[in-house]
Each structure stands twice: as structure tokens, then as C-alpha cells.
Image (tube, rainbow, N blue to C red):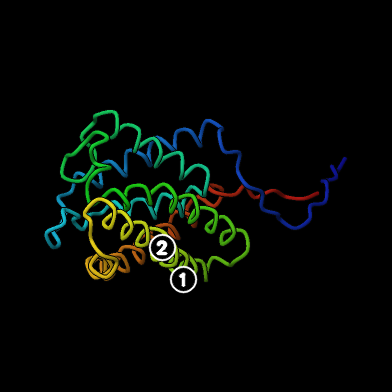
Amino acid sequence: MSQKTAPTGPTSSRPRRAWDAQSLALVAVFAALIAASAIVPGIPVGSFGVPITLQTLAVALTALVLGGTRAAAAVGLYLILGFAGLPIFSGGRAGLQILAGGSAGYIVAFLVGAFLLGLLAERIVRRTSAARRGAWFFLAATVVSVVVIHSLGVLGMMVNLKLSWQAAFLADLAYYPGDLLKNAVSALAATAVHRAFPDVLVRRVKQA
């Protein structure tokens, strides 16, 4: 006797559960990735103690792969470990005293930026084709970088280094070329991850 198979309809996308076992493992892995990116020696820029590092690339990649909630959790875990005393901030620094330096605004912006960029990544993965995903990832990462990370970075230098808005803005401009390059790399890498693991951010469900 022949068996009848249930008809299937189009595939829909649903957000992954934020705290299943796979998600918890990914949060830990990407927190370690961000910490490892800080170990790579930064490029000194100016005299304000804010070097160019790979951390912004790692944070952007984390957001584009994991989405808003899990990316914020990964960055939050990294920050908690660094504040607790592990030397995982750039230059091997650790502790809450880093919030008194010129990098404070950028460090706080990592958490906010990862969450917002992750939310945008979720929408991009659900609503755009794989062929256009890389361009949208780059655009989203650049917008979040300018609006959140650079803005809070400027604010941090104004507060902690007592710089005028003009001086802090000019100091921050030095980071734009590197960030554009890192955004492009993170967009390409995230596109490759989503191509290889299409369920990493949203679960594809066959509708009966």
C-alpha cells in the first residue's frame, strides 16, 4: 500500500528561542570571541588612549549572527567578566576603572549597539534574500556604528577627558575608515555564517 504524505506549504521564519541550549553555547562562544579580539594589539590613535581594535568587528559580527537579545547577552557577559577583573579589555586592562577613561563611551556603546544591530539583523534575515543580505548587513552595521558607537564614544571623551564637542568629534573621525572596513568584513562573515547555518538566527518552519 502506498503511503500518503502530508502536504506542505511555504516555509516561514520564526525567531529562535533566546535561551535554548544552542543559544547559551553561542552566547558563551561569541563572548569569548569578543574577548579574544581585544587581545590583538590595538593601533594607537592620538593621545587620548583609545586605540583602533578588532573589538568593533567582533561586536558587529556577534550582532549580525546572533540577533538582538543573544548579542546583548554575549556582550554583557564579556563586559561583566572584564569589570570583574579579567584582563580582557584592549591593552589587557580590566576593572571598573576603565569607565573613567577615554574608551568608556565606546565600551558602553558595545552593549547598546549589539542589541540594536542584532534587532536589525533579525529583520534583514527574515525579509531579504540571501543575495542582498550582505549589503543590508553592511548598511545596518554602518548606521549603528555612526549613530550609537561613535556618538557615545564622543560623549565619553567629552565627559571623561573634558574635551569640547568639536575636539572629541575630530578625535573620533580617525576611527571611521577602520570601522567601515570592519563593518564590511563582519557583513561578509555573517552572510557566510547564515548561508552555512540558516537556522542560527531564525528557525525555518514548514507550514502544513
Place of residue 196 in the rendered image (x, y in percent of width and height, measured from the top left): 47, 53
Give the structural element (helix, strand or loop) at label 2.
helix
For the residues labelled 2 and 1, say whether their Cβ atoms are less than 8 Å apart. yes
Mark linked to residue 18: none
Identified by mark 2, the residue type is Ala
Q: In which quarter of the image is the N terminus?
A: top right
In this view, 55 is above or below 163:
above
Relative depth, front residue between 133 and 152: 152
Q: Hey, which quadrant is residue 167 in on the image? A: bottom left
| Identity of the residue drawn at 63% across and 47% down | 15
**Left or right of residue 79, residue 91 in this image:** left
Judging by the rendered image, the residue that carries numbered circle 1 is 135
Q: Nearer the viewer, residue 131 or 99?
A: 99
Sequence-first tag of 2 and 1: 1
Q: Where is residue 51 in the image (x, y as percent from the top left)?
A: 18, 56
For image coordinates 51% across by 37% down, the residue present is 23
**Amino acid at the residue labelled 1:** Ala
In terms of image quadrants, where is residue 144?
bottom left
Where does the image place residue 83, in percent across and percent down from the top left?
A: 29, 33
Q: Nearer the viewer, residue 138 or 5?
A: 138
Crowd rating for badge 1 (residues with CA inside 10 Å; few <14, some 14–19, many 20+): some
Extreme residue toward the right, this view: 1
Q: Distance between the residues labelled 2 and 1?
A: 7 Å
Asked which secondary structure carries label 1, the reply is: helix
Residue at 41% across / 49% down in the picture?
62
Total marks in image: 2
Q: Specify few, some or many for label 2: CA neighbours under 10 Å numbering under 14, 14-19, or 20 or more.
A: many
In the image, is residue 94 above or below residue 53?
above
Instruction: List the residue tagged with mark 2.
Output: 187
Q: Position of residue 158 (x, y in %)?
A: 28, 58
